[in-house]
Image (cartoon, helix red, strand yellow):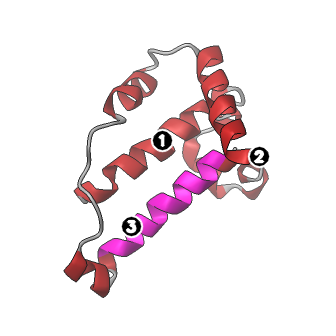
Amino acid sequence: MVASCKDQLKQVAICLQRSPCVLIERNKPKECIENPKLSKDLPELCKAQLKTFLECKRGIVDPKKRIRGNGALSTGKYDEQYEKLSTGNFDPFEEMKKLENLNSSIEK
């Protein structure tokens, strides 16, 4: 994986792990993205972060960005959150509240 997209990938993974589709309905994150019925219920924040990640991945093969650079390298900002969610070391109610707060701040 190219280092410039690692942070975006972790943001998407964290958001999907906090989403009701994964946290409550117990679907796999990939199913939540690919299945049209499930993806329409994803929070807007997750959709926006997924779009950002996909644009970053497209930037890897874009000839203009190859010369100028795709963006900053990974900062490791989301490593701790990602590790907690990946290992199951979290409170699901707290994660749902975090997602609702983030999603409501975007909708305003």
What amino acid is labelled 1 in the image?
Ala
Q: Position of residue 46 (x, y in %)?
A: 60, 47
Q: Position of residue 87 (x, y in %)?
A: 40, 22
Q: CA distance from mark 1 to mark 2?
A: 16 Å
Residue on which disc 3 sits: 57
Q: Quadrant of residue 95?
A: top right
Query: In this rendering, would 108 be left or right of 8?
Result: right
Q: Nearer the viewer, residue 104 or 17?
A: 104
Residue 82 is covered by the magenta coloring: no
Q: Earlier in the sequence, mark 2 or mark 3?
A: 2
Q: CA distance from mark 2 to mark 3?
A: 24 Å
Q: Position of residue 15 (x, y in %)?
A: 55, 39
Residue 42 seen anywhere in this rendered image of the structure? no
Q: Nearer the viewer, residue 93 or 106?
A: 106
Q: Earlier in the sequence, mark 3 or mark 1?
A: 1
| Element on which disc 2 rests | loop
Residue 58 is covered by the magenta coloring: yes
What is the magenta range?
A: 45-60
Q: CA distance from mark 3 to mark 1?
A: 15 Å
What amino acid is labelled 2 in the image?
Asp
Residue on which disc 2 sits: 41
Q: Nearer the viewer, residue 23 or 69?
A: 69
| Element on which disc 1 rests | helix
Label 3: few (<14), some or many (≥20) within 10 Å? some
